[in-house]
Amino acid sequence: MAAELSKKRKKKRKKYYRMRKNRVGASLFMFLLNSLIMVGLVHGFAFIFMISSINSNIEDEYKTKSALVRIYEMARSSGSTGYEVFDTAGLDYFIRNKDGSIGHTHGKITCSDSFFSYDMPASYGDPSLPDDELVQVDLYYDTEDQLISKDSKGGLGFDVKNIMKIALDRLGLFFGAGDSSADDRGYEDLDIEMPLWMGIDMKDGEQTLVFKADIGMRSTAVGSLIIVYMLMIVLFVVILITMIIDAVTAATDHHRLNQLIFTDMKIKAKNWLWFMYNAEQKLEAASTRRHFALADVEFVGFRRFCACNSIDEGETMMSDVYNSINRLIDKKELCAYNAEGRFALMLEYTDKDALKERMDKMLSELGNTGHESAAAFHAGVFLTDANNLNAKEIDIEAELANASAACASLADNEGTAVAFYDEKFIEEQRWIDTVAQIQQKAVDNEEFMVYYQPKYDPRTNELRGAEALIRWQSPEYGFLPPYKFIPIFEKNGFITEIDHYMLTHAARDQKKWLDAGLHCVPVSVNVSRAHFIEDDLAEQIRDIVDSEGTPHELIEIELTESAFFDDKKAMIRTISRLQSYGFAVSMDDFGSGYSSLNSLKDMPLNVLKLDAEFFRGEQAGTDRGEIVVSEAIRLAKSLDMRTVAEGVEVKEQVELLASLGCDMIQGYYYAKPMPSADYEQCVRAGRSDPESEDVIPVKLDKPGEKEPVPV
Ligand code: C2E
Ligand code: CA
Ligand code: CA
């Protein structure tokens, strides 16, 4: 698993690397290659140029000195020493006898011992000889002048660097402005002498003339060489400049392209790709002891905000939020815009609670980002340690998707909130999936049970009604209270099916008890908000109750207060139709929301159910709380509505409610929700005596105690 992830990560990194890679390296390589070729070319050219120039020099020397040798030989044969022939020619030379002894010297002898052989057409020295006959001459280096030397293979070597230096020096003198002596030296001064000592056999090998040959590069050759060098340098500089410009342009283009790839241009923020690239690198380099959190932060209602204002304003807002987040996070943490009002964050933490606190603080600060109305933010957070992963094992894409799933679970929450993707969350998600899979089977197998919670008149303790409350006896998951599945059904839409189920079974029970001759009281059934959207809801309810043959007055419909925010006209129509069919309609949980009074104004309701919060909240038992309850009851009465107080657990409250004229009490003080068989006993008894120990139903022993579950 970890190996697979590492492979995946490496592959991804390669992809990003390729994207980010600068081409400067390639340009540099090309530049170096070009330079090398250039230097090679120049040197090669110079070398060939020098060789050919020197070869022709050697051959010229040989030719002229061979002529002198012939004159010398003629002079010798006429009795003279013949030396004057060479002396008048101004040679530095010596004559070596066959046995190696030096016969005669003249001038400065700087001939070295090392020599090499040079082949040349014999016709140079003697035009009478054929062209293809070669004659071998020995060449010796000059000990003072090192411009020509032996190369590593024993051939002719040139000190190109020094030759060029001398050439340029002389060129400087030659062109030297205002230096008259340089002018006088003239063009000739460009000559570069590179003397070699040359041996020419005389008197049929009896003697050898070894003389300092005037070898070198003539001014024209040096001039041409310098011009070629100059041209090459100019060309080289031009190519260098072109390449530098090219490399700089490529680098800036590349930088711009990178910016483009890694930036959300609309809100000028780093984007998802940037986040992935950097997060991967950070996690890979991080020690396994560090804890990381990946968060998906969402501006709640981004689209609505854009629709109400404008897309531009939405984007400006996101840009501000992005900047705020960056101010609130550490430099080594990451934040990127992930489109549609969402941000991806990578944070570091040591303690989950501290992180939760930090997130809460951050989101509430974001809520005040430069806009008049406070904005709400949701965050889904994936934690490494909560999921038993270390930094190197995180698959960022997958875990951010999990953080998003946690964030999505907050969808119903209008305010700012944080959800963690941890064991608990995963368990919840699994449960949501499981419920969706088994819900239909549970209905088909009649796993849902109707529990009844009686409503009593607090003054007489007489049974006045009951509320049908669902319970799920699942063969796999045991006995489940409504909070475990009703919110899931409300989300996945199955609630309408459940409402039908409960109505059918409650009506069926009522009919059964009626037929058994019991004195039945109305049973209220909860109808969900989702259900109220249906146009023919009143007719559906009527038909279900009719199909069980139950009188309509024995069924009451409970609507939760939040349902009253929907389409008011349609709601009033449905309520009126239900009433016209003889069903009483009650408003559930009155006082738990904000718009209750307004709803009361418009809705022609029969019953008002005071929310349990009245008797449990902070105001409960205080004078102010009492005033609110008494006024609510008074208001209901003036609107010709009956009142039911929910969640009443203690005697004092019952007595108070009785004194305030509350019609019914549905609470643990009298009875908890109970299976239908137990409720049947309550109906048979018709009244309750909560003070007695052995009454039906069993009264609550301690406030807040849970109802009994069937075995
Ligand atoms: P609700 O409609 O407000 O139901 C009243 C809840 O308060 C019941 O919880 C009941 O057991 C509880 N209760 C009543 N008296 C007391 C008391 O003195 N002390 C305490 N601590 N609790 C008391 P229950 O049965 O768990 O139902 C919870 C919610 O589930 C219901 O709130 C209702 O919104 C929903 N629900 C239950 N059955 C159905 C159903 O058949 N259809 C629909 N749509 N929703 C249902
Ligand atoms: Ca209810
Ligand atoms: Ca209620």
Image: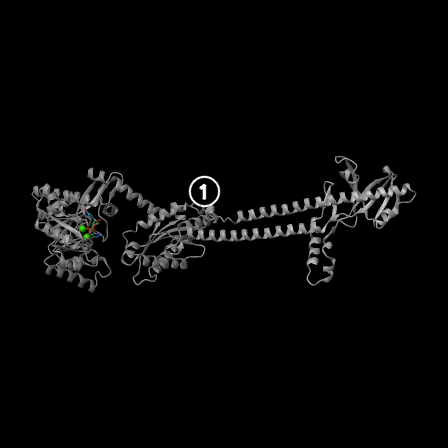
The answer to whether one can see residue 199 in this image is yes
Specify whether 671 is left or right of 351: left
The answer to whether one can see residue 101 in this image is no
388 vs 227, nearest the viewer: 227
Q: Position of residue 460 (x, y in %)?
A: 10, 55
The single residue placed furthest to the bottom in the displayed view is 623
- Report the quarter where the N terminus lies: top left
313 vs 486, nearest the viewer: 313
Q: How many marks?
A: 1
Identify whether 616 is placed above or below 25.
below
- The residue at the point 40 percent across, 47 percent down is 396
Q: Position of residue 228 (x, y in %)?
A: 64, 50
Q: Position of residue 493 (x, y in %)?
A: 22, 45
- Report the quarter where the C terminus lies: top left
178 vs 153, nearest the viewer: 178
Q: Within 10 angstroms of label 1, few (less than 14), some, or many (20 or more) residues?
A: few
Colour style of the rendered protein structure: one colour
Residue at numbered disc 1: 11
Q: Position of residue 695 (x, y in %)?
A: 15, 48
